[in-house]
Image (tube, rainbow, N blue to C red):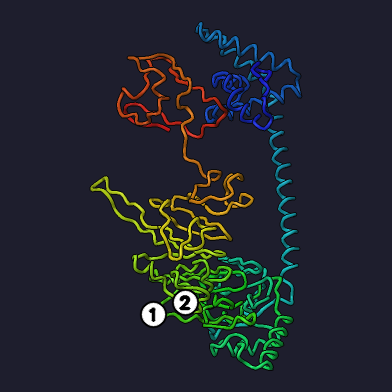
Amino acid sequence: NDYYQVWEACPIRELRMEHMENIVLQRVTVQQTELALQIRGFDTTSMNKLQMVYKLHEAISLEQEHAGPKLSQSYRAVEKEILETRDEKKKGFEEVAMQTGIAIWKPLQQKLKDWHEEKERQLTEVRLRREELHNTQYERWRERITTAERTEQLVPSIVTERGGAPLTYRTGALGFQSVAAGSFHVLAIGQDGRVYSWGDGNYGRLGQGQGVGMEQHAKAARAGKLGGPTPKQSAKAAALAAERVAMAAAKRFDASVPTEIQDLSSKPVLRVACGFSHSAAVVQSGELLVWGGGNSGKLGLGQITDEFECYCPFPVRVKFPERVRIAQVSCGNAHTGAVSEDGQVFMWGCADSGRLGLGSRFVGSVARPTLAQTLQVAGVRAKAVACGTSHTAVISVVTKVAEGKGVNRVAREVGGHVYIAGPAAVIGKDRHTFHLVRELEGKPVAQVSCGSASTGCVTVEGELYTWGVNKSGCIGHSLHKKVVRRPRLVKCLYRSPMNLALGRPARQSSIYNKRGPHIAVNGCTDGDGEKLCCHTQIDSQAFWEVDLGRICRLEKIHLWNRQRSEE
């Protein structure tokens, strides 16, 4: 900085690097830095301006360390004289000065090379120490997770004559391909298609099927009689059932590490979902298996009593109409939704507040999967369903259609509509059947998710829209917005491109035919024709500049001439 006398302190400490690159260094020309390096014997043919500045900084620092500031001052004086004599075309002086400067700096070239080698050695040592520390921490972590007690046997699906000893693996070394989280438990699908669960085992939500009294629940579930006695049954039967449930709850199976669900070991699982106290899995055959808490009919296994907390501690198949294959499932707090491979939507569980989207005549509990007729009649082919605490959202399939003719023929994505059902407190208006969210029309949605009282969706363009209750800013909007009634773009994650130069002061080296610098900042970016472009005279060093009014960094510049464009 003292070398060229252009230093200016940055007013904002956090922006000092941007200030250095975009303001201070702009006062030093490429010609100056190139000459300063060449007179010291450096080859600058493959360097840009920033690289030359960094190399010159190293050279000046080395000079001051080994020869003091006077050597740098002498070089700077010679550079100024060379630039002055260039205008007078005195090449003899420049050649002599170059040869002298290179000869003086030659001993320092070796020192600079040694300095670079030492710096590289130090960086290599730091990298190796970090890698060693990382490996040590990883080994300790793996040793803690993969203990001998959790080593399990792999049962090969195909056994050959050359098969050797039984295969074993350790849980900690297994890779996962997808994961789902509920209120108190987690499910994950391994790379081998097996399902693992861990967390709070209450209500049988882990699907491990362990504990005293579980056998009775298994028989009842398989017989379609999951649950305890009704009020009409004897007091003795009620007492026995209550005792059985209490014993099972006292012996429930919690898991602090991923543990395989044995009942699913022979069924490759494609997708899993978790709710408050129940879980679901879609297997390769198109079947849907559920387990966990069964109140409100959210398991879809049939009507059960509300007198006791009923649950199923192991996966049980849900019955659907013939030839229906399930492709996706979602679990809410008290209801469940599934989408078939044909795009049909089935809902069941608690129907309060219209969360099932089946119509106002459905109240209380819906114990069996029921087709969403409004979507079926409207011809909606669903892609996915998302269940929240008290509302549900469905998105339709996204398809591509061709528009235009000839070379102008392009593919456009259509579909991806969002349909929603639930109470006014969550979605702004009571909807007992699925209604189209019109604010998202023209923005095909690829993914949707529902929370406690909010909804979010991602479009095929990668835009995130959210709406609902904005408690503590949970949907990504300003904190003063307590409730967002309609889908709104989360601007903190995505902003449309903006023209920083629009209307800003601009100037250029000269003006031809009244094509001044203002044309470039008037907002028109078409550029089709000379009238829409600024134009200079035939200057030896033509320029155009604009004051953007803020510090910014240019990533790319395009230059056009009449023949081709260059980048």
The quarter of the displayed image where residue 444 is located: bottom left
Q: Which residue is mark 2?
A: 369
In percent of width and height, residue 206 lies at: 64, 75
The answer to whether residue 157 is visible is no
Q: Nearer the viewer, residue 239 or 130?
A: 239
Say what secondary structure mark 2 lies in: strand
Q: Amino acid at mark 2?
A: Pro
Answer whether labels 2 and 1 touch (C-beta < 8 Å): no
In percent of width and height, residue 285 lies at: 46, 78
Q: Amino acid at mark 1?
A: Arg
Please state which of the two labelled residues, at mark 2 or mark 1, is closer to the viewer: 2
Mark 2 Cα-neighbour bin, 10 Å: few <14, some 14–19, many ≥20: many
Mark 1 Cα-neighbour bin, 10 Å: few <14, some 14–19, many ≥20: few
Q: Nearer the viewer, residue 225 or 566?
A: 225
Q: Which residue is mark 1?
A: 323
Vertical relation: 129 (above or below) 182:
above
Q: Residue at x 75, y 67 (%)?
A: 144
Say what secondary structure mark 1 lies in: loop
Q: Of the numbered discs in the image, which one, if any, rests on residue 453?
A: none
Which quadrant of the figure contains the N terminus?
A: top right
* Measured Cα–Cα span from mark 2 to mark 1: 14 Å
Label 2 vs 1, first from the N-terminus: 1
The answer to whether residue 553 is visible is yes
Q: Residue at x 49, y 48 (%)?
A: 488
Vertical relation: 498 (above or below) 437:
above
167 sits to left or right of 299 = right
